[in-house]
Image (tube, grey):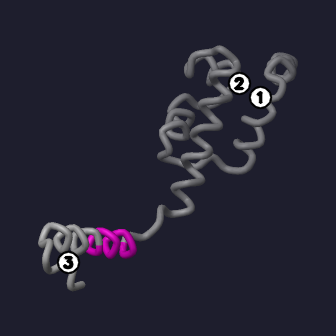
Amino acid sequence: MDGLRRYPQRLSYVLSTRKTLEDLRSTPPAAEEKLARSAAARAGRRTCQRTGLSQAKFAERFRINVARRKDWEQGRFMPDTVALAYLKVIETDPKAVARALDAA
């Protein structure tokens, strides 16, 4: 600490760094739900992009509500497990899903 007294700029740096570290420690980590929503949003966007369809055409083709789909992609709502599984099936084989829906 003696060396810090000789160089006040070092002391102010150390004190400001300590304050920043205290602020970081007191900030809670992101909620798990928020992280899960963002992962689901990325998966939804990726699925749509891989089909080459616009959001509206994707929603129409696979019978998903457009507004709900946008909510998923923007992270406002988390899709339930059935919707996540459906998106995974679409991502894996969109033509098979389209055939099944056309036959129904």
Magenta span has 17?
Answer: no
In the rendered structure, which disc, 3 or 1, sits on the residue that comes first in sequence? Answer: 3
Instruction: State how far apart marks 2 and 1 are (Cα).
Output: 8 Å
Pick whichever, 55 or 61, lies toward us.
Answer: 55
The percent position of residue 69, horizontal first and vertical second, equals 56, 34
- The residue under label 3 is 4
Magenta span has 21?
Answer: yes
Compared with 62, 68 (above or below) is below
Residue 32 lies left or right of residue 99; in this view the side is left
Front tag of 3 and 1: 3
Q: Outermost residue, bottom direction?
A: 2
Query: What residue span does the magenta drawing correspond to?
Result: 18-26
At 57% from the left edge and 40% from the top edge, which residue is drawn? 41
The amino acid beneath tag 2 is Phe
Residue 90: assigned label: 1
Locate the C terminus by quadrant: top right
Residue 15 lies left or right of residue 38; in this view the side is left
Residue 75 lies left or right of residue 94; in this view the side is left
Q: Residues within 10 Å of mark 1 (few under 14, many from 20)?
A: some
Determine the secondary structure under disc 1: helix
Pick whichever, 85 or 35, lies toward us.
Answer: 35
- The residue under label 2 is 62
The percent position of residue 45, horizontal first and vertical second, equals 59, 30
At 82% from the left edge and 16% from the top edge, which residue is drawn? 102
